[in-house]
Image (cartoon, rainbow, N blue to C red):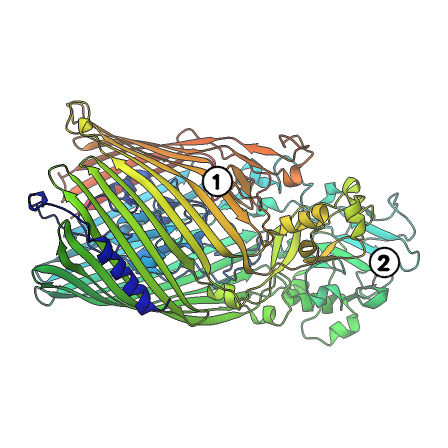
Amino acid sequence: MPPPCLLAAAVCAALFLTAPAVASAQDADPTTLDSVTVTGSRIKQSELETHVPVQVLTREDIDRSGFKSVSDIVQNLTASGAGLNTKFNSSGNFGFPPDGGGVGAGAATVDLRHLGPKRVLVLVDGIRWVNESSGSGVGSAVDLNTIPLALVDRIEVLEDGASSIYGSDAIAGVVNIITRKDVQGGDIELHYGTYEDLGGDTWGADMGYGGGNDRVQWFVGASYFKQEESASSEYGPASVPVPGTGVDNGSSATPQGRFVFMDPNTGLTHSITTNTGVTDPTFIPGQACARTDDFHCFTNADRFNFAPFNLLLTPSERKTVFGQVRFAFNDNVGGYVRALYNQRDSANQAAPEPFFLGTDAGIYNPYGESTLVISALNPYNPFGFDLTTIGPDANLFLLGRRPVEGGPRRYEQDVETWYVAAGLDGSFSVADRPWDWDVNVVRSESKAEQTNYGSYNLRHINEALGDPAACATIAGCVPLNVFGGAGTITPEMLAFIQPVVRDESENSLTLVSANITGALMQMPAGPLGFAAGYEYRKYEGAYRPDPITVAGEYNGVPSGPTAGEYDVNEVYAELAVPLYANAERGSALDMSIAGRYSDYSTFGGESTGKLGLRWQVAEELVLRGTWAQGFRAPSIGELYGTLSRFDATLVDPCSGPGNAVRPECVAQGVPADYVQTNPQISVVTSGNAELQPEKSRSLTLGGVWSPSFASDAAWSERLDLGLTFYKHTIEDAIQAPDAQVILNRCVFDADPFSCASYDRSERGQIVRFDDILDNLGTIRTDGWDLSLGWLLPEQDWGQLRFDAKTTFVSSFELLNESGQAEPRAPGVEVNNSAIPEWTSSLTTQWSHGPWALAWGMRYIGELRESCGGANGYAICDDSAADLNRLDATTYHDLQASWNSDAWMRGLRVSLGVNNLTGEDPPICLSCSLNGYDAATYDLPGRFFYARVGVKF
């Protein structure tokens, strides 16, 4: 529907439906309440409970939580899913996801309803924020670490679809961060925290200062935050690849080397490794595993334990300055300017980068797979013949060497984000009806450089392993020793093969918007509220990998450059229609209608609408419901991302003597003795310029009850109970099929689409695996939110307050392109993220004079998962059913605080501990890193913190 028709339809429908609205003159309420704009609507309104469920986190809630970042606050909401945070040690371990967004190393995002961060819209004072950059792709979600808590007055979380109000991305909900404005004087807070047994110390300072008069209001501030790293070796389950399995799930690229080849002189195929302590090995041909030379047959006991090199908590240092000024030109027109600069230094770390060479390497690089010859003339080649990957005479199937001499991989991110917004706003009256307007201009940019130490140039490895005479003609080239075991790769060898790799990425946002809101007319039941507006946005993004990566010489996870842009013009209209009002009974019925038309330069136009009803049954009871259409436009990375590699942790159903003989595996040419070489299998991913937008439908039904018998009573000052049912359906979901599911469906169901996605070598190893984005899926989820707020009367001993919220996910279904269900479901842990059926929080606060004590409880329900690489081990609960259980977890948080006005304008001291009982996260056998789900659970052990704040 073109935009004029859409808006006209919304207005006409509203006017038609107001015809039966009735209210007598005496029903009118003479009391005039201040009207404010609440997240979820552009119309200013005075009702405390609107048509949509909005959770408001006040500054007091934030301080009481014990957290020091916006991401930690919102990720601990019961409706939150698996967002990125600084517990994710992503670089070097996960490769490049299909959406072209990179791994987001050091960033933090928010996920609502388990629908993914890309389907959550983040606003600051009602205006969009720029998407993140971390130097590994073109991100499609906001990095909440760019917004310091020192800037925040409150956080409003809309847990409902809102594309008709805000446009693309607002499918699962909206997080609107409201900044501090009316500040008089200054404040400084110092904070320090540490984990009991892990280190990972954090400290920082926040400062703000504001003032003004009748015409000018200003506020400036600065924030500093530093977090030290904590190594995976500090926590037992994180110190091995898969808990309870030793090194059996370790890497076959070891410091001693693994060599799988065919001896052309004897025809024997060997899988051997150099004996420990041997630096100049001797090879005796013709021997199988009963060897008398310096090699032995490779077994699981020889695998490399890469886990201790990883990080449980990644280091991060963030510096932010910000300011805003508001000026009233006269009583009716004002203006503002707002600016922020944020700089982040963060890092990830992984084990020394392995060399995988040979026809079975599966690295998608000819320097290692199809043009490599390890010359017999190489002075370190102990076999006396060429090891080649070329043509029909290829006899090198796999060489895995872990060059510990070069140290671990270290990925350091330097990210700069700046944001400038300016605008005019004002008010006027038409027939004594107030109207408000605003015009806004935003320009924002996020740039990142990721510097990688500890990676290698595969072309140089190819040259250094070849004919020494050819190597001698290349500047810096010296023959490379991959056969002599740990310590035999010399500094001279490293100087030729180990470069410093630098990748860059950037995202920018240009926005212009204009809005107007007011009352069109006075209806019998109240004013007919109206809002309309226009918004223009332009997104630009690019990812530039290092030149050696573009040239195809990078030994690590390869990626291609990405660049693109698009713009969108949007118009919207919204109506708040009073249908009935009776002030004597405290009852009212009103309706909201909204429509939006978006015209994208990439795929064309898209219309969305929303309808809401709010019934004030009585002063103490409100019932409400909404139905909304939504959409999400494909991001720059999803549209223009080029071929990249993702190293997925997969279990090949054909691996192992008992599995390789399955008829399905035999049909794929898998030999009977096939064993998967490594737990990670390389998967090629890519964007898709033909993608269309995702489309969604959302439904919420619920109510809020504030019983009068619990108001101003001897036992209760106020009691609020809320109940909301939600349902989301997303069609044409942009996704790549789950790689593990593809393997399973090919082997067990002979699904032709799945079987066409990968190839095997003659020895059964998977050497090609394609997993490209498309509009493939359908996502359906529904559940319930229950909230309780109870304030007791103040007594001589103080006052108590209880705040509780519970989310129950009754269903979650992700269907693939064939209509088959993917393994995500309530109560299931899969792909490093969980959907607990039950998630709850309870905060009890006691206050008495200057003292306050807060006790918080966070509950995460039981989960189940596949045992993955631990199947058959004692740690797996049920190997026959491939089932492991993650027990329900409850965290207890305690904070004591003291406030005094005796010094300066106020002094506050807080001491607290999160995870008071020292609960360890449940062990996760299917998770890729650290033996637990970092998106769902806290780090193991207690976190102690102290804060001192002063106002002046």
- Which label belongs to residue 244? none
In the picture, the quarter occupied by the N terminus is bottom left
Q: What percent of the width, then of the height, locates residue 398?
A: 76, 56
> Rounded to the nearest whole Å, what is the CA distance between mark 1 and mark 2?
59 Å
Q: Which residue is mark 1?
A: 811
Residue in view at x 66 percent, y 30 percent: 874
Residue in view at x 42 percent, y 62 percent: 415
Nearer the N terminus, badge 1 or badge 2? 2
- In the depicted structure, whether residue 544 falls above or below residue 284: below
Query: Depth check: 254 or 726 in front?
Result: 726
Residue in view at x 16 percent, y 51 percent: 35
355 displayed left or right of 574 = right
Q: What percent of the width, then of the height, locates residue 443?
A: 32, 69
Confirm whether residue 107 shows in the render: no
832 displayed left or right of 263 = left
Residue in view at x 63 percent, y 34 percent: 244
Q: Which residue is mark 2?
A: 383
**Quarter holding residue 892:** top left
Furthest residue in direction front, as rendered:
20
- In the depicted structure, whether residue 686 falls above or below residue 673: below
Query: Depth check: 647 or 438 in front?
Result: 438
Circle 1: residue type: Ser
* Label pair 1/2, CB-CB below 8 angstroms: no
Within 10 Å of disc 1 (Cα), the crowding (few <14, some 14-19, many 20+) is some
**Quarter holding residue 930:** top right
Query: Depth check: 332 or 731 in front?
Result: 731
Circle 2: residue type: Phe
